[in-house]
């Protein structure tokens, strides 16, 4: 009965882990895409491969994996989520980790994969949404407010971040926030030039980790000693027996004595002395000793 | 006709000469070849870490044979060359975790489990890393470079390579060579500082023999060790994950073949590839810089600080321990994770003062704790500086 309970418990845990990991995997797929920047009125700005100017929307892959957005949908109408199906079979729909992709909102879908079948309304607010390949799951959406200034884009302050802002200098297909330095390193240079802060923090964490291990294993050791005592009491029926009191030297002496005794004891074996080569059709792959079906050694 | 032919031969011979090593050699190449030969000599004559110094030393010879940069794809820094492909295990950082897998499969944590307070010595010795980090900052290195240099004080070659490949790839050759050199020189660096910071009375302290550890405890250790350290410092996952995984293979008792592979053929293969490619990466043109000399100086300091911190911490710790439970401060140096050499030094120095005082088993506790501690410290530096 207990065994059934244990197996049921393990199965439940595994199922839970599978569900969670499936969600995590999903998180590294299309759901990790974000609408990152949009330019509604393009008067004197970025041009497409046909030399034309138009509004555009930029998507950003926030994950550390390549994401293929083929089959997803872009729309400007929440009631029509499948308005523009992103074509399948185009290698360019595979977005590298932390990379961008640009779609032209020029209502000229015949110009290729990255030209949408709708365009932005310069005098109104514009809704943009990205739906997953099922056409139901909303991955991300944004409403670009009305009254956009020509050649000023509306985007996330930091790629994949939360806060939206306007960019006088638009950044199509590149980072919204251009970093020329590693912020973490700059922070350390400014605030911890002598490394004292780092030393204190890091040594604190190292000590914390090993102190926690120490406490856990102190507890485990006490439990183990307690269990050993209980077992020896049960085995010997004598409460005074305590193997923990035997010193290492005594144990070593006993072990050596037993080893020497065993070394001297030999069975008389039948042996044949020969100069002929002994043939054995042996292979580790067929060996029973190394077989996967070997009974586990305790 | 003949003149033309001889002129053709002469031109060819001249062209061939421009391809020879002698034609392209610089004094730097000869200096590095001398360093490589010194490593090989130290390994063979004095058996200083021969498993590391022979591949690295020979790698230095390979890396410093001069050649004409004619796109022949022979140099380690030429994309697509055989050496470059082998070197990717270093630059992408996947050799060190595999070495840690092997280390886990060959490490017996019994000494640590039987006396868990020894873990704290392994933590204290990590002051070497951050002491060197501070000095490197003051010497003008950037924080990421200082972090990569500081890890030399962890006395753990794979960790040093792993971290420097992420934080400061341009310094990796010098850091790796420095870390392995000082690991080999532990018998020379540590004893004077162990003697300096201890009294004769302290050196004679006899510690209780470690208790016998059950197999259940040994199995629990890698599991709890992994979960606890990696939940605290997830950036240490590649190293700690493989270390504890290897140890579970060893201790579970049912994966003997896997454990034997990890601690035998696998670690040997990776050690060969790692050693020879790290050695070959020290091309004179890339390696002989003033920064490399500074890194060597800082590396030595980090070992001294780590050793001193370990010994002094034991003395401090002893203030809180009862008379029979005192720890011999001579095992403090073993917190520097050069396994098992620094533990052996504890044993040797201990025997000098009391021929019946065997400290090796006790020293193995802080020694393996040092491996965990330096991997955690590397994870912290990675998290802070990348």
Image (spheres, coloured by chain):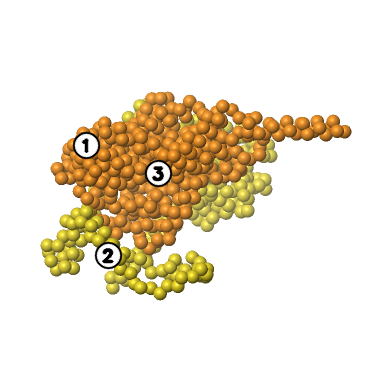
Q: Which residue is mark 2?
A: A261
- Chain that the image shows in orange: B
Name, please, the residue furthest toward the right: B1
Q: How far apart are labels 1 and 2 at the CA level? A: 44 Å
Name, please, the residue furthest toward the bottom: A270
Q: How far apart are labels 2 and 3 at the CA level? A: 52 Å
With A30 as the anchor, is A188 left or right in this view? left
User: Can see residue B347?
Assistant: yes
Front-most of residues B249 and A8? B249
Residue B63: x %, y % from top left: 56, 37
Q: Of marks 1 and 3, which one's residue comes earlier in the chain?
A: 3
With B164 as the anchor, is A55 left or right in this view? right
Residue drawn at 28 percent across, 37 percent down: B310
Residue drawn at 39 percent across, 45 percent down: B236
User: Can see residue A35?
Assistant: no
Residue B352: x %, y % from top left: 26, 39
Give me the chain letter of mark 1: B
Q: How far apart are labels 1 and 3 at the CA level? A: 32 Å
Q: Nearer the viewer, mark 2 or mark 3?
A: 2
Is residue A135 positioned above or below B119 on the image?
below
Q: Which mark is residue B235?
A: 3
Element under label 2? helix
Q: Nearer the viewer, mark 1 or mark 2?
A: 2
Residue drawn at 58 percent across, 37 percent down: B77
Element under label 1? helix
Q: Colour of chain A?
A: yellow
């Amino acid at each position: 009965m207990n065994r059934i309970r244990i197996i049921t418990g393990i199965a439940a845990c595994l199922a839970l882990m599978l569900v969670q990991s499936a969600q995590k995997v999903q998180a590294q797929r299309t759901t990790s895409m974000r609408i990152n920047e949009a330019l509604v009125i393009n008067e004197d700005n970025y041009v497409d491969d046909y030399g034309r100017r138009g509004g555009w929307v930029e998507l950003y892959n926030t994950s550390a994996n390549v994401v293929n957005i083929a089959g997803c949908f872009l729309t400007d109408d929440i009631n029509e989520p499948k308005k523009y199906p992103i074509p399948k079979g185009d290698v360019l729909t595979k977005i590298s980790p932390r990379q961008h992709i640009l779609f032209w909102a020029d209502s000229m879908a015949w110009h290729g994969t990255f030209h949408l079948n709708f365009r932005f309304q310069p005098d109104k607010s514009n809704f943009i949404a990205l739906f997953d390949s099922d056409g139901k799951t909303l991955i991300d959406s944004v409403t670009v407010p009305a009254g956009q200034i020509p050649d000023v884009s509306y985007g996330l302050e930091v790629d994949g971040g939360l806060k939206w802002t306007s960019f006088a200098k638009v950044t199509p297909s590149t980072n919204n926030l251009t970093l020329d330095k590693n912020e973490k390193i700059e922070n350390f240079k400014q605030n911890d030039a002598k490394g004292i802060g780092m030393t204190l923090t890091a040594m604190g964490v190292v000590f914390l980790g090993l102190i926690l291990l120490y406490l856990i294993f102190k507890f485990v050791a006490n439990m183990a000693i307690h269990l050993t005592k209980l077992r020896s009491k049960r085995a010997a029926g004598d409460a005074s027996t305590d193997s923990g009191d035997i010193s290492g030297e005594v144990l070593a002496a006993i072990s050596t004595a037993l080893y020497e005794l065993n070394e001297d004891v030999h069975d008389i074996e039948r042996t044949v002395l020969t100069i002929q080569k002994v043939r054995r059709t042996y292979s580790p792959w067929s060996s029973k000793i190394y077989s996967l079906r070997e009974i586990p050694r305790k | 006709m003949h003149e033309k032919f001889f002129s053709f031969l002469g031109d060819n011979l001249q062209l061939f000469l421009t391809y020879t090593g002698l034609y392209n050699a610089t004094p730097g190449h000869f200096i590095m070849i001398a360093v490589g030969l010194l490593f090989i000599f130290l390994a063979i004559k004095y058996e200083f870490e021969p498993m590391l110094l022979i591949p690295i030393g020979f790698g230095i010879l390979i890396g410093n044979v001069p050649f004409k940069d004619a796109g022949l794809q022979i140099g380690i820094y030429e994309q697509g060359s055989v050496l470059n492909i082998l070197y990717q295990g270093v630059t992408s950082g996947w050799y060190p975790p595999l070495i840690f897998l092997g280390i886990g499969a060959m490490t017996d944590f019994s000494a640590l489990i039987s006396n868990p307070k020894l873990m704290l010595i392994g933590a204290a010795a990590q002051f070497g890393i951050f002491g060197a980090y501070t000095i490197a900052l003051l010497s003008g290195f950037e924080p990421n470079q200082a972090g990569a240099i500081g890890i030399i004080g962890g006395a753990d070659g794979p960790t040093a390579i792993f971290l420097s490949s992420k934080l400061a790839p341009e310094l990796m050759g010098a850091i790796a060579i420095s870390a392995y050199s000082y690991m080999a020189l532990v018998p020379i660096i540590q004893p004077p500082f162990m003697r300096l910071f201890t009294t004769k009375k302290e050196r004679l302290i006899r510690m209780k023999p470690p208790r016998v550890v059950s197999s259940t405890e040994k199995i629990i250790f890698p599991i709890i060790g992994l979960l606890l350290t990696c939940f605290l410092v997830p950036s240490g996952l590649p190293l700690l994950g493989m270390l504890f995984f290897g140890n579970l293979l060893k201790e579970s008792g049912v994966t003997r073949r896997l454990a034997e592979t990890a601690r035998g053929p696998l670690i040997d293969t990776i050690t060969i590839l790692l050693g020879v490619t790290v050695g070959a990466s020290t091309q004179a043109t890339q390696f002989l810089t003033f920064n490399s000399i500074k890194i060597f100086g800082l590396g030595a300091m980090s070992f001294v600080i780590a050793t001193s911190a370990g010994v002094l911490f034991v003395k401090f710790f002893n203030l809180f321990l009862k008379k029979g439970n005192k720890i011999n401060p001579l095992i403090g140096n073993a917190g520097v994770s050069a396994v098992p050499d620094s533990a052996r030094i504890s044993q040797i120095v201990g025997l000098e003062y009391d021929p019946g005082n065997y400290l090796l088993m006790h020293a193995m506790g802080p020694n393996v704790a040092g491996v965990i501690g330096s991997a955690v410290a590397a994870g912290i530096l990675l998290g802070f500086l990348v």
